[in-house]
Image: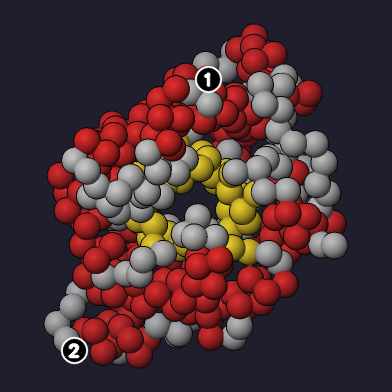
Amino acid sequence: MKPTQALHELGQSLWIDNITRTMLDDGTLASYIDELSVTGLTSNPTIFDKAIGGGNAYDDQVAELHEQGLTGEELFFELAITDLRRAAELFRPVFERTAGVDGRVSLEVSPTLADDAEGTIKQVADLYSRGEENFFIKIPGTIAGRKAIEESIYAGIPVNVTLLFSTEHYLGAADSYMRGIERRIEAGLNPDVPSVASLFISRWDAAVADQVPDELRNRLGIAIGKRTYAAYRDLLESDRMQKLMNEGARPQRLLWASTGTKDPNASDTLYIEAFASPLTVNTMPDKTLHAFADHGEVGDLVPRDGGDAEETLAAFGDAGIDVDALAAKLQEDGKQAFVDSWNQLLETISRQRATA
C-alpha cells in the first residue's frame, strides 16, 4: 500500500496545492486522483502566477477574452474558473461519494480585499455563482475576513479560510464559521455548509531558522500545529459544536497548509508525517506529494492533547521568540506576499495580452 493511500485510509484527506492547465491537459491531475489518493485541490495567486506565466497554455484564451473586452482581474478570474471547473469535474466522483465532505477545489478572492469585508463578501458571492457546487472560496482569516466568513457561510457559500498562522487565528475563524451556521439555524435554513480552516505551517520555521539553536530547527511549525490541533479537538467536542452538529451542521475541518519543506537539510516529508490526523486535510505541492508517495511513512497520529507542543513553545520563548508577535507578522507578510503575486500575475496577463 502506498503511503498516500495509508494516510487517506486513516481518515485524512490529501489535497494537491497546485493547478496548471498543463496538468489538466496531460492527465497529471487525473493520475493524482487515481494513483495517489488525492481528493481535492487548492490554489492561490502565487500558484496561478507561475501557471499562467510558465508557458503558452493560456495564450489563446487570453487573446479570446481580450477580444471580448476583459482585462486585469476580470480576465484572470475567467482563466482561473475555467481551470478549476475542469478540476472540479475530475473530483466530482469523490464529492458525490463523500456527500460533499471532500472532492473540492479552492479559488481565492483578490488578496487586495484582505482588509475589506464588504468587498470580500461581494466577490465571494460572485465567484461562487460562477463556479461549481464543489468549489470552496478562500477568504483570508484577517479581522475583516472574519466578518466575510460569517456572512458568506450564512449565505450558504462553502469557505476555505486561509492565512491562519496560530491557534488564536484558527479559533477566530472557527467562531465566525459557527456564527454563520447559528444564524442559518435561527433563520430555518439548512445548516450543512462545508468549510475548512487552513493553518500555515512551514513559514514559521523559515522565519526563525537563523534565530534559534540547532535543536529547535524545524520544530516551531509542528508545535504550533499540535497546539492548534488540541484546540480543534476541544472545539469539536464542545457543547456549542455538538449542538450545531445535532441540527445537521458538519464540523469545519482543520487543514494543514504550507506543508512543503523549505529547509533543504530537513526531511522532504516532514510536515506530512508530522500531521497524520483523522478529520483533517493536508494540502501539499507536487514535489512533496511525490516524495511522500515514494518514501513517506505514516507513524503516530497527532496527540489529542497536542503532546509536547507547550513544552516546545516554551523552549522557543526561552530562545527569544515571541510567538504571538510572530504570528501577527506572518499573517501580514502572507497578505503582502499574495498581493505581490497578484500584481505580478496581472502584469503577466497584461504582457500576454499585448503580444497576443
Instruction: Identify the residue at image location x=54%, y=44%.
Output: 255
45 displayed left or right of 147: right
Task: Determine which of the numbered discs, if any, sits on residue 163 in the image.
Answer: none
28 displayed left or right of 295: left
Residue 304, placed above or below residue 122 = above
Q: Position of residue 33 (x, y in %)?
A: 63, 71
Return the residue nearer the eye: 311 or 94.
Answer: 94
| Residue type highlighted by circle 1 | Val
| Residue type highlighted by circle 2 | Glu
Q: Name the residue under label 1.
A: 323
Q: Name the residue under label 2.
A: 67
Instruction: Identify the residue at image location x=45%, y=63%.
Output: 105
- Image quadrant where one finds the C terminus: bottom left
**Helix, strand or loop at disc 2?**
helix
Q: Where is residue 272 in the image (x, y as percent from the top left)?
A: 70, 47
**Helix, strand or loop at disc 1?**
helix
Residue 324, placed above or below residue 17 = above
- Image quadrant where one finds the N terminus: bottom right
Instruction: Identify the residue at image location x=30%, y=53%.
Output: 157
Q: Residues within 10 Å of mark 2 (few under 14, many from 20)?
A: few
Q: Which colour scheme is used?
A: secondary structure
Instruction: Identify the residue at image location x=36%, y=66%.
Output: 133
Return the residue nearer the eye: 307 or 20.
Answer: 307
Return the residue nearer the eye: 40 or 293.
Answer: 40
Quadrant of residue 188 in the image?
A: top left
Q: Position of residue 144 (x, y in %)?
A: 24, 36
